[in-house]
Image (cartoon, rainbow, N blue to C red):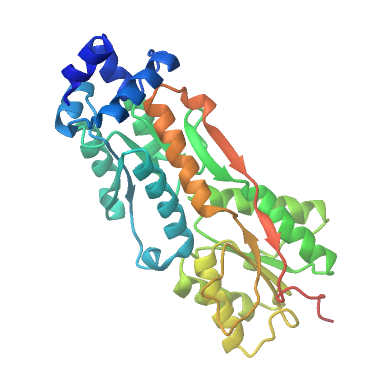
Amino acid sequence: MNLKALADTLGMSKTTVSRALNGYPEVSERTRQRVLEAAAAAGYRANPVARHLAVGRSNVLGIIYPLLPADLGDPMFLDVVGGVSAALEAAGMNFIIVPVSPANELPTYAQMVTGRRIDGLIVSRTQVDDARIAYLTDAGFPFVAHGRTASAAPYAWFDYDNAAGIRLAMHALLAQGHRRIALLGSPDTLNFARQRRDSYLACMAEAGLTPDPRHLIESAIDRRSGYQAMQRLLAATPRPTAVIVDSHLSGVGAVRALLDAGLAIGRDVSLVVWGTMADGLAGLDVTTIDQPDARDAGARMAAMLLALLNGAPAAGLQELWQPVLLPGATIGPCPG
């Protein structure tokens, strides 16, 4: 059965039936349900080429991602992408990942948008001042940011509360008597890293403490840089008695550096890592700041993107989920 035959059966125009099938907001819910039920009963399947021509959509959503070598082995990244992909597949949409070099990222956005190759995007690894979000906002192109930025323009975003997660870790360490607490952070051009650093500084100030500048590192994003950053912290005199690592990938390197230095984690140096440590070392039970339900978070971003395509205002699609502190064996009393 084609679209015309389905419309004739229902006694409706082809335009109304097409709009009902494609989720246009101006079609009443009663009409939409009637069309969907008739289409299901008749075994109607839309011609994707004809649909693209009729509604100006490619039926493809995606993410343009400057992949690092570690990303394909990152369980958090894979869980989020898996949640997005499964939700969009259930909605009859296609999801693609477009890997790019950092230098070619913004030109690829322009190519995808102006060429109408894609209907909507998820923008990941948001920056404090993010040219991608500014470009998509100016272009009026549907997108959901996985993270926030400093932009004052209304846009759809999903994020975990970075400031709250650091407060959980800081309060746990302060309660154990730690005062020389270090933050091993990611580059502070990334918005999550800036928010976590600001929360760390605020917690130190509230406790009446002044952080040693050598104990605040903002360059770790993977295992190697995490290892090297932890070596720098251990070389400082005095060295920190506790360290918060704001990335689970660099956390693996940090753990390895502590073990290679012959230190007992949780006794000689306490450690908290942001994110899952499923690939942790030596079976160590690491205290973590967890972003729960990563697959559900991906599915939620997919739902928000579909809502944008169906006319929902971006300003009403902003969600902040809460992290939790998962106790482990790597926090102990301040030594000495």
**Left of 127 or right of it: where is 55?**
left
**Residue 287 lies in quadrant:** bottom right
**Quadrant of the image containing the C terminus:** bottom right
For this rendering, which residue is in front, 213 or 78? 78
Relative height, residue 194 to residue 156 (above, below): below
> Which residue sits at x=63%, y=90%?
262
**Left of 62 or right of it: where is 183?**
right
Outermost residue, bottom direction? 262
Residue 165 screen position, x and y as percent = 67, 53
For this rendering, which residue is in front, 254 or 291? 291
| Total labels drawn | 0
Is residue 233 at least partly visible in the picture? yes
Relative height, residue 22 to residue 63 (above, below): above
**Left of 292 or right of it: where is 72?**
left
Residue 332 screen position, x and y as percent = 78, 75
Residue 186 screen position, x and y as percent = 52, 60
For this rendering, which residue is in front, 22 or 245? 22
Relative height, residue 4 to residue 168 (above, below): above
Is residue 14 at least partly visible in the picture? no
Residue 136 screen position, x and y as percent = 35, 32
Relative height, residue 319 to residue 66 (above, below): above
> Which residue sits at x=23%, y=15%?
9
> Which residue sits at x=68%, y=81%?
265
For this rendering, which residue is in front, 49 or 99? 49
**Quadrant of the image containing the N terminus:** top left
